[in-house]
Amino acid sequence: MDKIFVLGAGAMAESFIKGVTQGDVADAKSIYVINRHRPDRLAELSETYGVTPAASMEAAKEAGVIILAVKPYDMRLALVELSPYLHGQLVISFAAGIPIAFMENVTQGRAQIIRTMPNVPVAVLEGAIAMATGASVNRESVDVAKRLLGKIGIVVELEEHLMDAATAFSGSGPGFVSYFLEAMEDAAVQLGFSAELARQLLIQTVVGTAKVLEEWRLSPAELRRLVTSPNGTTHAGLTVLGNLGMREAIAQALVQAEGRSREMGEQYTAVE
Ligand SMILES: NC(=O)c1ccc[n+]([C@@H]2O[C@H](COP(=O)([O-])OP(=O)(O)OC[C@H]3O[C@@H](n4cnc5c(N)ncnc54)[C@H](OP(=O)(O)O)[C@@H]3O)[C@@H](O)[C@H]2O)c1
């Protein structure tokens, strides 16, 4: 694997570094990391994972793969600073909402750009990552990206116009699932449980349900039907959720989240 240049040294950069170094796809020393203000953070990453702090953006020149792990509102400046050192490398962006066309524009077409939308479970290498590729990205680069990102989660390749929708349900998904669990936990406390005990059962319920869906290759609707006996407890509970319009509420939540993702992308890429 070529040298990798990681622009940004925050949570997302660390998840990526952790995955690729543990996953043996890249030699830790060949991973160069840069941030703006915090040399202590670079030292920490170097000590923990064996990566190399980069002295300047110029290190990107030698890299075959560049990872953009900066906040969406910092992307324009980061790309401007990076641009002089680009000569066709693969650039993988983690920045939510920033379109490929914007990145290609700022870098004047000097890179092969892949846009991704990871989610928080990448921190434990269990992420769900949506990925869209720019027109100039060759097949080999797509394979490299999949190999690297595959170390921090599952990778799904999709058309870029679906990225805002992916942001809504897999990007924001951990927040929605947690909200549901929070409500379940509160309700369990009302039924006499301690929050701690309820949480233990709830977390395992989600993990176990996800595994059953995956291993038995069932759709959520099929599993729901399987566990819902007529007039049983699940049926009683689901009837209430149906009557209160839970499906409609979820659909509306995703539409709102998708719209907000698009809006934020437009805000960060607007011409000043
Ligand atoms: N964290 C997640 O689970 C997650 C999930 C999905 C998507 N993402 C995306 O991943 C990206 C990074 O998120 P994060 O949570 O890792 O952010 P973060 O913790 O705030 O880290 C951002 C990093 O970018 C550095 N930076 C910003 N501008 C720079 C520049 N011009 N040159 C060099 N370094 C620069 C910052 O350096 P200083 O600290 O020195 O300023 C910092 O190390 C975001 O775009 C976010 O949308 C993250």
Image (cartoon, grey):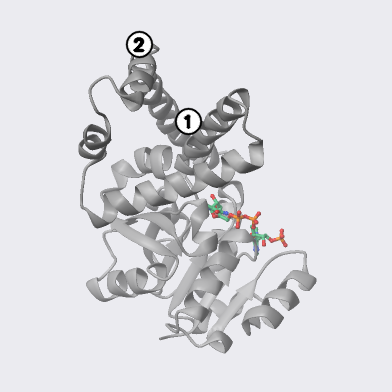
Total numbered labels placed on residues in the image: 2
56 relative position to 241: left or right:
right
* Mark sitting earlier along the chain (2/1): 2
Establish if 251 lies above or below 120: above
The quadrant in which the N terminus is found is bottom left
Residue situated in front as seen by the camera: 174 or 7: 174
Q: Residue at x 74, y 70 (%)?
A: 41
Q: Which residue is mark 1?
A: 260
Element under label 1?
A: helix
Tell me where residue 257 appears, x and y as whole percent: 45, 31
Crowd rating for badge 1 (residues with CA inside 10 Å; few <14, some 14–19, many 20+): some
Residue situated in front as seen by the camera: 174 or 172: 174
| Numbered label attached to residue 237 | none
| Numbered label attached to residue 243 | 2
Establish if 88 lies above or below 10: below
Crowd rating for badge 2 (residues with CA inside 10 Å; few <14, some 14–19, many 20+): few
Amino acid under disc 1: Arg
253 relative position to 42: left or right:
left
Ligand 1: give its quadrant.
bottom right
Amino acid under disc 2: Asn
The quadrant in which the C terminus is found is top right
Question: Could you give the CA–CA distance between mark 2 and mark 1, rounded to whole angstroms?
Answer: 28 Å
